[in-house]
Image: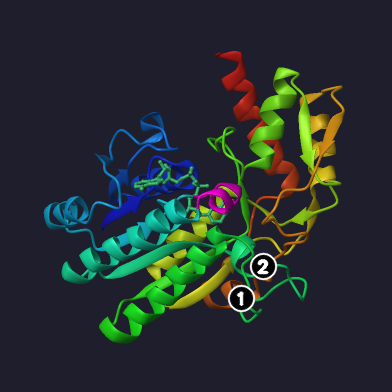
Amino acid sequence: MKVLVTGGAGFIGSHLVDRLIAEGHEAIAVDDLSSGSAAHVHPQAAFYRTDIRDSQALSDILTHEKPQVVFHHAAQAGVRYSVANPVHDASVNVIGLLNLLEACQHHRTERFIFASSGGAIYGEQETFPADATHPLQPVSPYGVSKLACEHYLRCFHNVHGLSYAALRYANVYGPRQSTRGESGVIALFADRLLRGEPVHINGDGCQTRDFVYVDDVVEANVLAMQSNVHGAFNVGTGVETSINDIFVHLKGFTRSSVHPEYAPAKAGEQRRSVLDISQIARQLDWRPRTTLMDGLARTVAYFASRTEHG
Ligand SMILES: NC(=O)c1ccc[n+]([C@@H]2O[C@H](COP(=O)([O-])OP(=O)(O)OC[C@H]3O[C@@H](n4cnc5c(N)ncnc54)[C@H](O)[C@@H]3O)[C@@H](O)[C@H]2O)c1
């Protein structure tokens, strides 16, 4: 099958491209490299350095490549960045999606898989864990833009018959996650602990997240591609872990003696976040396979080898 992955040079998108190529698919990666890295794009993938806000460029790529399936991972993915820059967030996340949807509709793409955010679109949760029927009350512009995308997808499904699944990721972690960005607390802490640098915890560290390993997220994308289910699906673990606990585990794995420094909590971030995954387990037979301890060990090993090689 011919598949196109936007954000294919990014953390999750590049792992997805690797897996699709390993399964014998022909993969095309589209990315403007604003946060991704060309070094992460699989050498067998066709790569287009393109901004998804450029509708003509996207249309040209789809005309030329004619992918049957499109995975949309390119995004402005920073929650805090979106609070400070809501217009830029919407231009990439909302206009970029619409450009892609128009091109897909024109070129009759068969299946569309969207990287949504279970962490951001539910807002402060009322029930724990949140299932897909939980009220949608995003507290950040990023969450609003992801929710707007889901509404557009449903609209394109109803009006144009688009076959899609929106995968609402919890907090994804693993090798290649950026340590510069703000979303990857595990990558950031692991990297700093390995370098012996100070680690800052925002707030009291008792805030919780649902951490899901990147390979499990890739598996959910592959299953979503192979099925014809449509709508929104949570992709997490159902397990709530505090930032303080993440710090303690990583401190153990890295054998660090660093103590955390506590800083004020950040605006636009929820207190607790954990997803109910029974719907995707039922409909796609997907479950996370990687325990937190295994995932943390693999992630630390990746950052340790990177630190060793400068
Ligand atoms: N990492 C998480 O925990 C998480 C959680 C929920 C949802 N998501 C979503 O998953 C997707 C992938 O996230 P990630 O963690 O791999 O982030 P990432 O920043 O590593 O990947 C995003 C990619 O999109 C590219 N990009 C950004 N703006 C672009 C533009 N205008 N045109 C073309 N490419 C552009 C970046 O260069 C980057 O390679 C995003 O849509 C993100 O919102 C991630």
Amino acid type assigned to the residue bearing label 1 in the image: Leu
Q: Residue 136 carries which label?
A: 1
Asked if disc 1 is less than 8 Å from ligand 1, the answer is no
Question: Which callout, 1 or 2, points at the residue further toward the start of the chain?
Answer: 2
Identify the element where label 1 is drawn: loop
Q: Quarter holding the N terminus? A: bottom left
Choose top left, top right, bottom left or bottom right for residue 230. Answer: bottom left
Please identify the quarter of the rendering in which residue 91 is found. Answer: bottom left
Q: Where is residue 36 in the image (x, y as percent from the top left)?
A: 43, 37
Magenta-tinted stretch: 77-85
Please identify the quadrant where the C terminus is shown: top right
Instruction: Answer left or right for 298 relative to 24.
Output: right
**Residue 103's spot in the image, x, y percent?**
21, 64
**How far apart are labels 1 and 2 at the CA level?**
7 Å
Q: Name the residue under label 2.
A: 123
Specify the principal SS of the magenta part: helix
Please tell me which residue is depicted at 26% across the width and 82% down the height of the picture.
Answer: 160
Residue 284 in picture, x, y percent from top left: 52, 72
Is residue 84 visible in the rendered structure shown here? yes
Q: Which colour scheme is used?
A: rainbow
